[in-house]
Amino acid sequence: MKFVDILHAHLDAFNQTYEQQITTAMRQAIYSMLSCRTNTERTSHWACQSCTHTTDYPLSRGHRSCPQCQHNTTADWLAKQQTKLLPVEYYMVTFTLPFELRIIAKHQSELLYQAMFSVAASVLKDFAHNSKSLGGEIGFTGVLHTHSRRRDYHPHLHFIIPAGSFNKDKKQWQKSRGKYQFNAFNLATVWRARLLEYLTNKLDITLPAATPKKWVVDCQHVGKGLPALKYLSRYLYRGVLPDKNIISNIDG
């Protein structure tokens, strides 16, 4: 059983029920999944070298929500990231959007996700620059996960960061040591203040009345980095509901 088959069978009823809640991005995802490898205007042309036989195969649409598309994309991303790994230890820092702000993310996802990346990146760079043990520039790879393993809507960012920084003036690599690269409580405090300021002042977004005082940031040592990259790649280029997890479709 495939998700796209269920989508085909129930699309009219879905549109009728959720018409007021379907965003442009959702409609684009639906169109991409329904037309994936069926649009004969976009094909790859194959010819046999031993005879005159030729054939055309419809191309995939490449949308990140499509269960049919993303295996090769995931493998390519992982291979590319592996070539960037340094021979050092790594940390993973995770920034979580609190529950109270997720309603904004649902309706203005593009704006909020970009804001999350911009703010989190600035926080990490400033912490590294101001750190007595580092005092330099850091690089990192950041990815967005929109759902938890239980498929609850749960936007959060993961950053894979080498355990050290580069001092441009001295042209020297400064290694960091220990289980934690930065103080998670301090990271969370600055993350909260900067993101709220960004949303209100730059994006003019009205915040919910109840915004929690304490936010969650996690900072952990993850070894050489490859296991963390493999973990991130599993959830990076795929829809929330893979075909293999669909057990049955009963009564619509």
Image (cartoon, grey):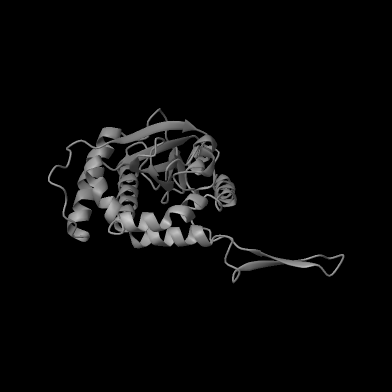
Q: Position of residue 63 (x, y in %)?
A: 49, 57
Is residue 138 depicted above or below 149 in this figure?
Answer: below
Q: Which residue lies furthest to the left in this view?
A: 209
Question: Percent x, y for residue 42?
Answer: 60, 69
Question: Residue 38 sits in which quadrant?
Answer: bottom right
Give 129 or 9, whichever is nearer the viewer: 9
Most foreground residue, 104 or 13: 13
Furthest residue in direction front, as rendered = 251
Could you tell whether 162 is left or right of 189 in the image? right
Question: Does residue 22 appear anywhere in the picture?
Answer: no
- For the N terminus, give its image quadrant: top right
Left or right of 133, for residue 239? right
Image point 16% across, 48% down: which residue? 208
Number of disc labels: 0
Residue drawn at point x = 41 percent, y = 51 percent: 169
Depth check: give the residue in front, 19 or 148: 19
Q: Nearer the viewer, residue 57 or 201?
A: 57
Q: In this view, does 55 lie above or below 75?
A: below
Above-or-below relation of 212 to 36? above
* Residue ID at (50%, 43%): 242
Residue 193, image x and y in percent?
20, 46
* Image quarter hosting the C terminus: top left
Q: Is residue 77 visible?
A: yes
Q: Which residue is drawn at 53% across and 35% down?
A: 227
The quarter of the picture where residue 157 lies is top left
